[in-house]
Amino acid sequence: MEGDPEPGSVVDVFYSDGKFAGKGYFNAQSQIMVRLLTREKGIEINDGFFLKKIKKCWAYRQKLGYTENCRLVFGEADGLSQLIVDKFNEYFVIQTLALGIDKWKPAVVKALETVFTPKGIYERNDVPVRELEGMPQQKGFLSNPFDPKIIINENGLKFYVDIENGQKTGYFLDQQDNRKAIKNIVKGADVLGAFTYTGSFEIHAANYGAKSVLGLDISQNAVDQANKNAELNGLQHIVKFEAVNAFDVLKHWDKEEKRKYDVVMLDPPAFTKSRANIDKAINGYKEINLRGMKLVKPGGFLVTSSCTNLVNTETFLQIIDMAAKDARRKIRQVSFLTQSADHPIIWGMENTHYLKFLIVEVG
Ligand code: SAH
């Protein structure tokens, strides 16, 4: 290191032989000391750089068919390390999770105001990882204040999104393409969904012609939102939600009540963010998938997801295989998908490929 760069400032990076490697933001306090923004020497990192990047991000999403809602910026996968921007039609939620990008927050906001005509921009930086970069957790308006309870359209349905108090940025856009993938298997079906959050999959199931849908989430707040979303779409007679611990009730319903469903859908939260707890996460997935599978009628379907970064594809599929063997059920893969296309994957950057979404027929 030469000189004494300011924490969060942009520095030049060189190979050991002195050749230019790139420019990136610096933070001596972080385990990742420099996060590269460009490999080109002639490029200045200024407001214009961020404007150009955001324009490029939007052009890419539009090309893929996203019009209203999308993850507009997906951090590393868009060359903007630790910047997340979720676009909910005319509202934007941003996260700046490294000190370097946090310093450019005004430039990002300005770029959004230039490319779009936002009704509101909100910061959801209430994320613990910021503390590893020496930054406080915080949230609030980055535009004039607005009502942070908004309504979005997805696949022809409406959902309330609570930008201020919802989980993460308020809504899980990464499953938006996968929600369409359940269309055929839920027709006329009795469906059970666990880990429903605000009920997006369950309301899709009802809309696609399910006979009945029951959604479970441990958070009463999520369940209240989910019920409101069902009403918003006029589907409250088909889809109901209950605030319970899915681990407990799935076990009970199998053992004591012998309940059966045509389709069981599972979308648990990331069970670990640290390598130290990986075994615990694997056991969690195995347990819940075993419970879920046992509740599926022969010939029905299990729809199961994992967003745990550290549980890779191979491990996830092994877990499902083990669960099937323990449940003494034969499974057939129907489809295996990943996060929606507005969250592009960079090969070799494992953290950009995090979502596993699997549909199996359970014999
Ligand atoms: N399927 C949702 C996202 C689910 S996020 C969607 O597409 O929008 C994971 C959810 O699991 C959270 O809402 C969280 O409250 C819930 N959760 C966590 N532990 C749980 C448990 N033991 N039982 C039921 N729900 C749980």
Image (cartoon, rainbow, N blue to C red):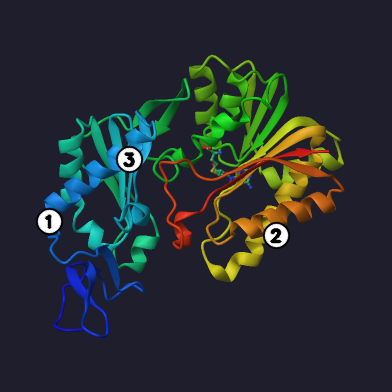
Mark 1 or mark 2, earlier in chain:
1
Closest to the camera, between mark 1 and mark 3, is: 3
Q: CA distance from mark 1 to mark 3?
A: 22 Å
Q: CA distance from mark 2 to mark 3?
A: 38 Å
Q: Secondary structure at mark 3?
A: helix
Q: Which residue is mark 1?
A: 46
Q: Which residue is mark 2?
A: 283
Badge 1 amino acid: Asn
User: In this rendering, does residue 34 appear at all?
Assistant: yes
Q: Secondary structure at mark 2?
A: helix
Instruction: For label 2, count other residues whose C-alpha is less than 10 Å away and answer few (under 14), some (14-19) or many (20+).
Output: few
Which labelled disc corresponds to residue 60? Answer: 3
Quarter-of-image position of residue 230: top right
Question: Are the residues at dot 1 and dot 2 in contact (C-beta closer than 8 Å)?
Answer: no
Badge 2 amino acid: Asn
Residue found 68% across the figure and 25% down from its top: 186
Residue found 50% across the figure and 24% down from its top: 229
Residue found 63% across the figure and 60% down from its top: 281
Residue found 72% across the figure and 32% down from its top: 263
